[in-house]
Image (cartoon, helix red, strand yellow):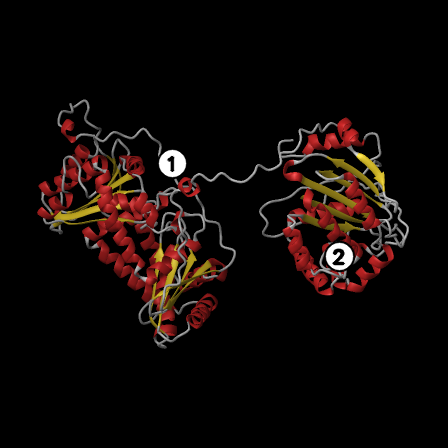
């Protein structure tokens, strides 16, 4: 927009006059045709006039890489426009007191000048001009960035300020209230000028601005000037999206420790509280005053008067979205900050349980009402203060707050203390002074391409063959044999990428009768076998497998042990030697069994409150109505835990000695290997290892289970899980089995099925 062109506007082009919306206690709200709001507060007793332009944009509105942008832009708007080249100098020439400030929800620019019509017109014209026409130039950014960085570094010099910044960032995991308005150093130093301009053009528009004029002025004349300079700004075509991030409730105390060079320990705590517009805000404000007031506050009495702390302070972050109640304590040197926190939390717990004496509540209310009235009697102060209420949601909240404050009772204070001063709702900060900096600076890489240079790499990994995966070709290429001991072997040798080889083995043992009561031992035995042999400890096994670039896993269930190996061709023989030790010479170390038992019990304890685990277990147990001693029985979580606790090393030793052997099973090997060599090594591993007990397959019998819906209520779980199943007489040998597999894939093998 160019103000030079505005003088040529015709009567037909002139904007509609401001529309009066409402008047509350001497403050009148108007609306301009372009969406801008105006608040006028005439005060004939004042010799001055204050103009306050408030933009409803702050650090809450910053995106990724934009931290500190709202504040940086505030600085940039003092760098001039084509019409006002040196704004600070022009303001000083008129004897103005002026400033600009940025907070979470807003940015404001205000000046208080001697109350003349010329000064009022100057201020209105200048504010309208810089709202739309500020330079926002790269060269100004370069110079102003150093000013803002200096402000950032001044803040870094204050341990209390840095502690609170880190506490806030921990208290708010998702909402931008967790990011300091001053911003991140890298964002401040590197922000592109185009990003800053886009931010300016997006938010510095009349529909996102509230103009406040207070002091000595003529209302009609002020409205004419406002409409002349602000009303002629076109209404933006863009639609301004509102922020929508909502911070979820905390589910546990968070603790932040800051260690920096310093002398005086500091502790701080913030409690989440509602947004400023909430009905509890006045009572929370009274609560804060009764906690920290000098000298009557309960925390002051408990900490400062006892000479454990030098000061206690508090404040409310009353904001557009839910904010925090902040409490800070400077600890007298020599006192343990943890002890101070203990006293602090004990005191707050007493307030939750017993409340605050009525006389202290009255004292706090009178203090807050005094501050309220003093601001109301100073039109310049009120004009600036209204920025906060506007950014909270509506300027009239100021009056609603006063009305609510007058009605606050001791019962209200106790209620909000009990509601919000909870352990789960707090984030604690502890500043621990140190003599030397202990921070770890992580090195950055500026140019990855330069770092890599002309690196060429090593020899190309073996690519493997173009293999036809049709069933016919697989059958053609597969060699099927039976070891002399009885285990069946399928060998498919082919060239693979990286000369990889995969082996799967299943060894079978026992029958339905002999495995009664041995379900838990059958499930634990394979894992314990891998954790120690006559020649190797668990660590030695893992180290050797890592050297061989091999994976070896072993698991089991009643009646079978399953082994899976993935390795390179050159390592296969060595890996099979390790497997032979695991299978033939396990020591079944009791210490390792205890570790596995502890881990499995912990997993089961977690499953007690997991909807998915509970649902699946419920269905499985209903579809398998076997006796408790049957290896097919599905125990409850509680039963499983008791079984694991009762399991002993002797149970595993007995199962191994009486059942495990190499007489029955299947082995499949696929990859880059010599069939003859592998077959021979497998024979050496298993042929002379006879199973002590006969094997007979344990079938999963179909049962006529009536349909049933089971609802499992688990508190504090937002997401429900559905799981269903049925049984019918079919197994993998049934002719319809392939059809069933395809049908299952169509119905639910993926999220798109």
Q: From the viewer's perspective, tell me whether residue 130 is left or right of residue 707.
A: left
Instruction: Tell me the tag on residue 241.
Output: 1
In the displayed orientation, state which residue is furthest to the bottom. Answer: 306
Q: Name the residue under label 2.
A: 529
Q: Where is residue 283 in the image (x, y as percent from the top left)?
A: 38, 59
Between disc 1 and disc 2, the foreground one is 2
Q: From the viewer's perspective, tell me whether residue 457 is left or right of residue 115.
A: right
Q: In which quarter of the image is the N terminus?
A: top left
Residue at position x 66%, y 48% in the image: 550
Residue 40: in sight, yes or no? no
Q: In which quarter of the image is the C terminus?
A: top right
Local packing at callout 2 (Cα closer than 10 Å; few below 14, some 14-19, many 20+) is: many
Q: Where is residue 379 in the image (x, y as percent from the top left)?
A: 19, 51
Q: Quadrant of residue 393?
A: top left
Q: Where is residue 452 in the image (x, y as percent from the top left)?
A: 44, 42
Q: Where is residue 277 in the image (x, y as percent from the top left)?
A: 37, 49
Q: Is mark 1 on a helix, strand or loop?
A: loop
Residue at position x 40%, y 49% in the image: 444
Q: In which quarter of the image is residue 591?
A: bottom right
Q: Which of 694 and 264 is in front in this view?
A: 694
Q: From the viewer's perspective, tell me whether residue 242 is left or right of residue 683.
A: left
Against 674, residue 104 (above or below) is below
Alpha carbon distance from label 1 to label 2: 61 Å
Residue at position x 37%, y 56% in the image: 165
Q: Are marks 1 and 2 in contact (CB under 8 Å)?
A: no
């Amino acid at each position: 927009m160019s103000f030079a062109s505005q003088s040529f506007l015709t009567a037909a082009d002139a904007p509609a006059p401001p529309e009066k919306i409402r008047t509350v206690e001497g403050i009148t709200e108007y609306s301009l045709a372009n969406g801008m709001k105006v608040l006028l507060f005439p005060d004939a007793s004042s010799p001055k006039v204050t103009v306050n332009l408030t933009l409803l944009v702050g650090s809450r509105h910053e995106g990724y890489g934009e931290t500190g942008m709202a504040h940086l832009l505030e600085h940039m708007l003092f760098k001039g426009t084509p019409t006002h080249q040196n704004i600070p100098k022009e303001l000083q020439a008129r004897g103005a007191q002026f400033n600009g400030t940025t907070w979470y929800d807003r940015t404001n620019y205000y000046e208080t000048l001697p109350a003349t019509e010329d000064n009022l017109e100057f201020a209105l014209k200048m504010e309208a001009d810089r709202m739309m026409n500020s330079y926002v130039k790269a060269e100004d950014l370069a110079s102003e960035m150093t000013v803002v960085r200096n402000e950032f570094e001044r803040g870094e010099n204050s341990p209390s300020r840095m502690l609170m910044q880190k506490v806030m960032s921990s208290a708010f995991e998702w909402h931008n209230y967790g990011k300091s308005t001053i911003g991140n150093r890298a964002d401040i130093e590197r922000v592109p000028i185009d990003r800053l301009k886009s931010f300016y053009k997006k938010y510095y528009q009349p529909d996102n601005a509230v103009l406040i004029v207070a002091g000595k002025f003529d209302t009609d004349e002020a409205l004419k000037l406002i409409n002349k300079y602000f009303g002629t700004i076109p209404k933006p075509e863009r639609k301004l999206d509102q922020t929508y991030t909502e911070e979820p409730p905390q589910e546990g105390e968070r603790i932040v420790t800051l260690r920096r060079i310093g002398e005086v320990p500091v502790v701080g705590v913030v409690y989440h509280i509602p947004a400023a517009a909430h009905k509890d805000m006045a009572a929370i404000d009274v609560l804060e005053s009764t906690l920290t007031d000098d000298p009557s506050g309960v925390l002051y009495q408990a900490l400062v008067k006892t000479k454990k702390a030098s000061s206690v302070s508090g404040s409310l972050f009353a904001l557009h979205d839910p904010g925090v109640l902040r409490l800070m304590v400077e600890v007298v040197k020599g006192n343990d900050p943890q002890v101070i926190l203990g006293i602090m939390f004990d005191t707050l717990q007493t307030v939750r349980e017993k409340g605050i004496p009525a006389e202290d509540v009255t004292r706090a209310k009178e203090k807050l009402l005094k501050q309220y009235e003093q601001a109301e009697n100073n039109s310049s102060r009120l004009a600036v203060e209204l920025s906060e209420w506007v950014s909270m949601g509506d300027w009239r909240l100021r009056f609603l707050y006063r009305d609510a404050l007058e009605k606050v009772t001791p019962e209200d204070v106790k209620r909000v203390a009990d509601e919000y001063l909870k352990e789960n709702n707090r984030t604690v900060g502890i500043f621990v002074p140190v003599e030397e900096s202990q921070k770890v600076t992580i090195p950055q890489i500026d140019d990855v391409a330069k770092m890599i240079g002309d690196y060429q790499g090593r020899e190309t990994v073996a690519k493997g063959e173009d293999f036809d995966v049709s069933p016919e070709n697989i059958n053609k290429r597969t060699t099927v044999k039976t070891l002399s001991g009885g285990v069946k072997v399928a060998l498919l040798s082919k060239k693979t990428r990286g000369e990889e080889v995969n082996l799967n083995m299943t060894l079978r043992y026992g029958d339905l009768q002999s495995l009664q009561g041995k379900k838990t031992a059958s499930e634990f035995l394979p894992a314990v076998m891998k954790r120690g042999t006559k020649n190797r400890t668990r660590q030695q096994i893992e180290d050797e497998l890592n050297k061989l670039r091999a994976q070896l896993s072993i698991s089991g269930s009643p009646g079978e042990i399953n082994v899976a190996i993935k390795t390179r061709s050159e390592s296969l023989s060595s890996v099979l030697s390790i497997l032979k030790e695991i299978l033939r010479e396990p020591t079944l170390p009791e210490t390792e069994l205890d570790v596995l038992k502890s881990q499995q019990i912990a997993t089961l304890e977690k499953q007690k409150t997991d909807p998915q685990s509970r649902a699946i277990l419920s269905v499985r147990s209903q579809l398998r109505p076997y006796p408790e001693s049957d290896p097919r029985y599905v125990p409850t979580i509680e039963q499983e835990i008791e079984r694991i606790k009762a399991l002993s090393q002797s149970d595993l030793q007995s199962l191994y000695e009486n059942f495990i052997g190499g007489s029955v099973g299947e082995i499949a090997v696929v990859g880059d290997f010599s069939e003859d060599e592998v077959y021979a090594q497998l024979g050496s591993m298993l042929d002379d290892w006879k199973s002590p007990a006969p094997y007979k397959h344990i079938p999963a019998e179909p049962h006529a289970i009536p349909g049933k819906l089971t609802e499992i209520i688990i508190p504090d779980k937002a997401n429900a899980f559905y799981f269903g199943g049925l049984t019918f007489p079919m197994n993998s040998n049934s002719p319809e089995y392939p059809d069933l597999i395809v049908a299952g894939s169509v119905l639910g093998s993926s999220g798109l099925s």
